[in-house]
Amino acid sequence: MDVTAENPSVSENPSGLREAERQIAELAEHQCRVGEGTPEWEDLETQIRKLRKAAFADLTPWDKVWLARHPSRPKAEDYIERLFPDLIELKGDRCFADDPALIGGVCEFDGRPVTVLAQAKGRSTAENIRRSFGMMHPEGYRKAMRLARQAEKFRRPVITLIDTSGAYPGKGAEERGQAQAIAECLKLFSGLKTPVIGIVLSEGGSGGALALSVCDHLAMLEHAVYSVLSPEGFASILWRDESRAEEAAGVMELTAQDLKKKGVIDSIIREPLGAHNDFNYVCSQIDEMLREQLAGLSRKKPSQLSADRLRRIRSWGIDSRRQRTEQE
């Protein structure tokens, strides 16, 4: 049975990811009406799979920005519940307050204690407001530093989960030393004498993300983005026209594939159909990567870890500068 014949609004070749998502939603709604297990339901499921596979076959950078912001995309809390279910959360920066935009704590992973630092967006509007949409305040960065020092003292590896559009830009945050907190975080993590592994889950924006990205191994989910600012901000500054955000995304080189070529990140975690469509598979890929990296990094001496990390950071941009020089 060809369901597209009965649903004129559903085409076999959708133009773009968002159009495919709309058509998939229509088919899924029709599935609910016919009931699971029937031949018609199975045919609908086949068409949904085909549509989704076709839509993800050739994504543009702007598609990836849209995916990174998808409302159904798993949040840090979802990954914590699956990968670090016994996490004991530790709150507060011991200076001002706790920052709900950062979940930090201690747990066991692969038979060893680890410290987890996760930038947390909310699963609902109310929770997003409470967590400032994942945008950390100075107390969040100071909490991260407190827990990182504790991890170093007890020789625990640190795992950071990065998902933020940037640091919180409010007046209070600036008054409490937002820039200084980020700078101190960068300095601390640069010389931390314990393994640090970072994962960009969705959005990695500006210094707010960079503060937790100084690590021995930085991975990105396949459809995450990582950049100095948003495409909207880029277009507003460069062209004074926010409506050119899609064009900006195309020239910013903010995808995992672009950044892997430049050596900014070390590995890409596959999510062929998006993390929100196959969460179990993505978690299994993250789990495998963490086990492999922890096993290798744990064999290094503390002094070697910090020295290698600094060497890695200082190499950023060198190849790009060489290429530009050769072209000139």
Image (spheres, rainbow, N blue to C red):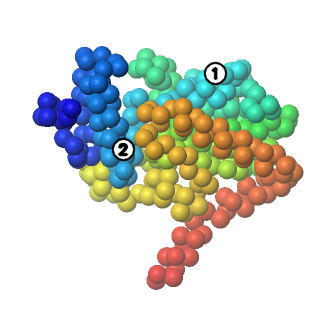
Q: Is residue 309 left or right of residue 81?
A: right
Whether residue 96 is situated above or below residue 273 in the rendered picture: above
Report the mark closest to the observer, 1 or 2. 2
Amino acid type at mark 2: Lys
Tag shown at residue 187: none
Between 33 and 269, the one lying in front of the other is: 33
Q: Is residue 214 left or right of residue 128?
A: right
- Residue assigned mark 1: 97
- Residue plotted at (25% across, 16% down): 33
- The answer to whether any part of residue 176 appears in the image is no
- The answer to whether any part of residue 229 appears in the image is yes
Marks 1/2 in contact by CB < 8 Å: the verdict is no
Q: Quadrant of residue 314?
A: bottom right
Tag 2's secondary structure? Answer: helix
Q: Residues within 10 Å of mark 2 (few under 14, many from 20)?
A: some
Amino acid type at mark 1: Ala
Whether residue 18 is situated above or below residue 299 in the rendered picture: above
Between 216 and 321, the one lying in front of the other is: 216
Whether residue 180 is situated above or below residue 45 in the rendered picture: below
Q: Position of residue 38 (x, y in %)?
A: 30, 20
- Residue plotted at (58% across, 29% down): 79
Mark closer to the chain start, 1 or 2 = 2
- Residue plotted at (35% across, 20% down): 37
Between 315 and 70, the one lying in front of the other is: 70
- Residue plotted at (32% across, 41% down): 50
- Residue assigned mark 2: 53
Q: Which image quarter is the N terminus in?
A: top left
Q: Quadrant of residue 32?
A: top left
Q: Quadrant of residue 189?
A: top right
